[in-house]
Amino acid sequence: MGFASFEQFGPRGAMNCTVDSAAPAQPLVRRVDDCVDGDASDVSNDDLNRHEGSASKAKPAFMLRVIETRFPEAKLLEPDVFGDERGFFKETYSKNKYESAGIIDAFVQDNVSRSARHVLRGMHYDMRLSKLVQCLVGALYDVIVDAREDSPTYLQWEGFELTGDNHRQIYVPRGFAHGFLALTDVAVASYKQSEHFDPKFERGLAWDDPAIGIAWPLTAPPIVSAKDQVWPHVVRA
């Protein structure tokens, strides 16, 4: 049995959370008609045989595992990954499947960023939009912060390791700030967002604000843009 552990922190202290990474995936796709359409050569026969009950061996039933976070609105996601000697194939987004997981946002813009080791980006938010974030290459320590002033979890945060190998995604709801630290020499992040970028609505929180207390896994001084260095600190009453 395998386990994945991550730490949850907030103004009221630290919490530890351990997830059984060997637990069965949540079967959100149940009919072959809901499965991916495409060239059957994208998936090996061994992978097809693992999905018993499919009406067609040309269409495997791709699964999406949902892992709850400390925030009811945020979700950690693990898509099915099919690998063989050629590499792997996976779905990174499928509207019907993600809606079944409670993610009903209509995403309108995709973005990709490439970061060197020790680059820290964040903490950014726009109260209008949500994000679906993943790491395509390398590894990121990805953090979300509840920026909703009327929320019972205001300024609490949670961190996740997203890598090109674990294939995990984090759904960042509206009203949450987001940022990450690159843990590898090259880290490529990809994310979808539910509104087009508009600088009029862009907001931010200081990545090192002690009122939030994010425990970044720093091994050297972070490389932070001039813009991200001047986001305000929270003023507590």
Image (spheres, helix red, strand yellow):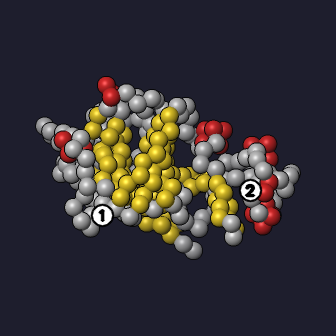
The circle on residue 57 is: none
Residue at label 2? 42
Q: Relative to 87, is 176 on the left or the right?
A: left
Please tell me how crowded label 2 is: few (under 14), some (14-19), or many (20+) other residues with Cα within 10 Å: some
Distance of mark 2 from mark 1, alpha carbons?
A: 37 Å
Which element is circle 2 on?
A: helix
Q: Position of residue 192 (x, y in %)?
A: 50, 40
Q: Earlier in the sequence, mark 2 or mark 1?
A: 2
Q: Relative to 203, is 35 on the left or the right?
A: right
Q: Relative to 57, is 9 on the left or the right?
A: left
Which element is circle 1 on?
A: loop
Residue under the image location 80 percent in, 64 percent down: 45
Q: Is residue 87 above or below residue 70?
A: below
Q: How many marks?
A: 2
Please tell me how crowded label 1 is: few (under 14), some (14-19), or many (20+) other residues with Cα within 10 Å: few
Residue under the image location 77 percent in, 63 percent down: 44
Q: Is residue 124 above or below residue 44?
A: above
Kind of residue sitting beneath label 1: Pro
Q: Quadrant of residue 151?
A: top left
Q: The C terminus lies in which quarter of the figure? A: top left
Residue at label 1? 217
Residues 26 and 89: in front is 89
Q: Position of residue 99 (x, y in %)?
A: 61, 38
Residues 160 and 93: in front is 93
